[in-house]
């Protein structure tokens, strides 16, 4: 408890049904000249963006919309968005969506104040200046990009997902309004929910974990285990949606301040090479990477089992740890996640290249067990 820690959290977080109204009131008091809304075409066409802009117009807040963000945002997306930010004289960014608009908005914000090419910032804390101010409205209970110091952009030339860990990208206002998450498709709900579970589990077992992050991660695991099946089965359940909104918000704070692990490193390769949705990639790989990690911290996996509702009384530590893996796999199956990489279109001939690239990913250093190239290849094979 005498350890010294630096904790990064957004200056303001708004969580709960209806907080979108609080956000607009907050923005209105800041007297920004013009806001760049960063989102995707689907959310724009579904009217989710309009729910926000209608409130903004009532407060006479000026804005322009950039809705070209792809599911795995690219360098081109970022630079196109930056051009619109500059040409419209914007001084504030409002992201609306899941992890893709959030990450793209962060990247635009960093370039707006630091200049250069987004590829210049791959790595850890490479920018010099705080990003343009950002408010991030999360519409899926998964990535937690709205509360983290991380963002991920796809280099479409190298077909690699670049991971940026940068304190300067932290948003000014994080927003989780579960009313905006209602009635999302079950596959999207399942994938983002399993993404949140991956964040919580990796945060709990990472080498950078500490007492604060441990408590946050375990509580997030508990909330997800209690509510994900329910919200996948009934997308209109506001109470379950609210639990998931809190869970991913809490998990995001945990991993942003202690790190992740090899699940994310391996999943990033699927996204970069095949454009696989990040949450699905994480969900498929999670039980296989954690089986590899089991020997490094079995006592932690025993606590994960408890958090997931497993009665471990009468089990030894190893049995309880194994029960955690079974619970993870069962939850993934129950919410309809694909059974393996084969279903995702992965090619075994790419596993060696993916393994080498995964070991270079910034998340690998946080894994509780050292991963070698052959280990990585074996994990991909087991998940196939």
Image (cartoon, rainbow, N blue to C red):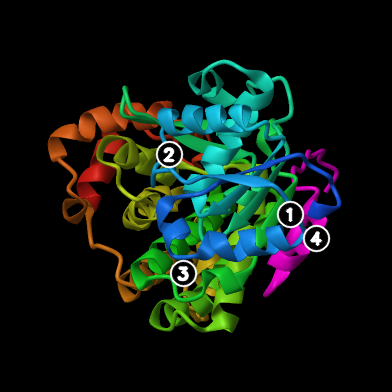
Judging by the rendered image, the residue that carries numbered circle 1 is 212
Q: Give the foreground label among 3 and 4.
A: 4
Mark 2: give few (<14), some (14-19) or many (20+) Cα within 10 Å: many
Q: Are marks 4 and 2 in contact (CB under 8 Å)?
A: no
Judging by the rendered image, the residue that carries numbered circle 2 is 73
Q: CA distance from mark 3 to mark 4?
A: 49 Å
Q: Give the foreground label among 4 and 1.
A: 4
Compare residues 136 and 60 and report the one nearer the observer. Answer: 60
The part of the image, by quadrant, that contains residue 177 is bottom right
| Mark nearer the N terminus (3 vs 1) | 1
Q: CA distance from mark 3 to mark 1?
A: 23 Å
| Mark nearer the N terminus (3 vs 4) | 4
**Highlighted range, magenta:** 1-27
Report the side of 144 relative to 191 (left or right). right
How many discs mark residues in the rendered view?
4
Residue 243 appears anywhere in the view: no
| Mark nearer the N terminus (4 vs 2) | 4
Mark 3: give few (<14), some (14-19) or many (20+) Cα within 10 Å: many
The part of the image, by quadrant, that contains residue 2 is top right
| Mark nearer the N terminus (1 vs 2) | 2
């Amino acid at each position: 408890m005498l350890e010294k820690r630096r904790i990064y959290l957004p200056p303001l977080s708004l969580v709960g049904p209806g907080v979108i109204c609080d956000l607009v009131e907050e923005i209105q008091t800041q007297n920004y000249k013009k806001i760049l809304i960063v989102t995707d075409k689907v959310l724009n066409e579904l009217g989710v963006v309009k729910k926000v802009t209608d409130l903004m117009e009532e407060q006479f807040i000026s804005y322009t919309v950039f809705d070209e963000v792809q599911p795995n945002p690219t360098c081109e997306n970022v630079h196109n968005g930056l051009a619109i930010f500059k040409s419209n004289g914007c001084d504030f960014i409002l992201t609306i969506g899941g992890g893709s608009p959030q990450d793209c908005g962060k990247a635009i914000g960093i370039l707006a104040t630091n200049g250069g090419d987004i590829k210049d910032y791959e790595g850890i804390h490479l920018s010099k200046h705080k990003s343009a101010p950002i408010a991030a409205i999360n519409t899926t209970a998964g990535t937690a990009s709205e509360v983290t110091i991380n963002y991920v952009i796809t280099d479409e030339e190298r077909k690699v997902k670049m991971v940026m860990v940068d304190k300067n990208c932290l948003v000014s206002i994080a927003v989780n309004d579960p009313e905006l998450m209602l009635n999302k498709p079950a596959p999207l709900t399942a994938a983002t929910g399993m993404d949140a579970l991956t964040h919580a589990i990796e945060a709990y077992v990472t080498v950078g974990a500490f007492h604060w992050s441990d408590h946050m991660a375990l509580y997030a695991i508990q909330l997800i285990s209690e509510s994900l099946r329910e919200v996948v089965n009934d997308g209109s359940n506001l109470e379950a949606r609210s639990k998931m909104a809190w869970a991913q918000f809490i998990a995001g704070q945990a991993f942003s301040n202690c790190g992740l692990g090899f699940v994310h490193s391996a999943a990033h390769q699927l996204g970069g090479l095949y454009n696989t949705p990040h949450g699905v990639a994480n969900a498929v790989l999670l039980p296989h990477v954690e089986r590899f990690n089991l020997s490094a911290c079995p006592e932690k996996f025993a606590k994960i089992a408890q958090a997931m509702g497993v009665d471990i009384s009468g089990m030894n530590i190893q049995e309880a740890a194994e029960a955690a893996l079974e619970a993870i796999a069962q939850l993934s199956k129950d919410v309809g996640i694909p059974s393996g990489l084969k279903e995702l279109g992965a090619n075994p001939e790419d596993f060696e290249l993916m393994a080498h690239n995964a070991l270079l990913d910034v998340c690998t250093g946080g894994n509780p067990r050292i991963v070698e190239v052959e280990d990585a290849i074996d994990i991909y094979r087991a998940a196939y």
